[in-house]
């Protein structure tokens, strides 16, 4: 059951990563067009602002994909010298800490969005972008990351409690450079 949940979450996150990647490509094309237009004396304007929004959205949504692809940075000096049980306990501890941090970020992000909704806030820029248009998907990305992190942690905890330690490695383990160099 746990491994099936992780597979489904990976499939969802691959779709999310494709959408985010497409959004970044569109943003890059927009910036490139603006750069070319500047060479002929005109400009679209607002490319810096839009690129900043794109990066914020890509970060909040991309974290979930990175989680299940073992792309988050971990220092595994002690972990790499231990047996399967100890490694799974180190991994579980790191996931509990990550989940706590990400859930806290998602909770703290809500008042930012709520204030923008209540006040009808706009960016203090020439585009005067309604901030809710950017902050709502940004907030949703953090919530998705929090849900993903919590579900991943619960799946790992379940496997550890069932004494299936080695099965946690592919989704909460640490990507070791040594493995990639062999």
Image: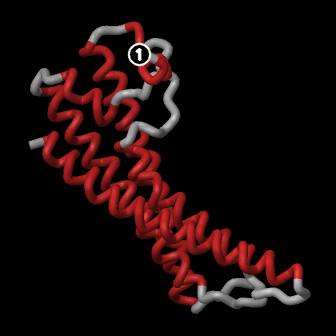
- Please say if 14 is above or below 129: above
Q: In the rendered view of the protein, which quadrant contains the N terminus?
A: top left
Q: Is residue 83 left or right of residue 125?
A: left
Residue 127 in the image: state x and y as whole percent.
72, 89
Residue annotated with mark 1: 79
Residue 172 in the image: state x and y as whole percent.
33, 33
- Residue drawn 35% across and 9% down? 82
Q: Is residue 133 left or right of residue 36?
A: left
In front of the other: 101 or 84: 84
- Please say if 17 is above or below 66: below
How many tags in the picture? 1
Residue 65 in the image: state x and y as whole percent.
39, 51
Q: Is residue 67 left or right of residue 77?
A: left
Within the image, what quadrant is residue 30 found in? bottom right
User: SS for tag 1?
Assistant: helix
Q: For the residue carrying disc 1, how many other residues have a C-alpha within 10 Å: few (<14), some (14-19), or many (20+)?
A: some
Q: Is residue 118 left or right of residue 16?
A: right
- Residue drawn 47% across and 77% down? 136
- Residue drawn 66% across and 71% down? 51
């Amino acid at each position: 059951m746990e491994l099936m949940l992780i597979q489904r979450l990976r499939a969802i996150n691959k779709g999310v990563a494709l959408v985010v990647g497409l959004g970044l490509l569109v943003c890059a094309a927009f910036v490139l067009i603006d750069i070319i237009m500047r060479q002929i004396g005109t400009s679209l304007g607002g490319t810096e602002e839009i690129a900043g929004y794109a990066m914020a959205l890509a970060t909040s949504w991309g974290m979930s994909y990175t989680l299940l692809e073992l792309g988050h940075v971990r220092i595994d000096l002690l972990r790499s010298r231990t047996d399967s049980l100890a490694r799974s306990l180190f991994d579980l501890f790191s996931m509990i800490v990550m989940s706590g941090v990400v859930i806290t970020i998602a909770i703290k992000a809500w008042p930012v969005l709520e204030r923008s909704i209540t006040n009808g806030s706009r960016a203090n820029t020439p585009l005067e972008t309604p901030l809710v248009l950017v902050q709502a998907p940004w907030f949703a990305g953090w919530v998705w990351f929090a849900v993903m992190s919590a579900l991943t942690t619960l799946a790992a905890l379940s496997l550890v409690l069932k004494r299936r330690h080695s099965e946690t490695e592919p989704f909460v383990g640490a990507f070791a450079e040594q493995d990639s160099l062999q």
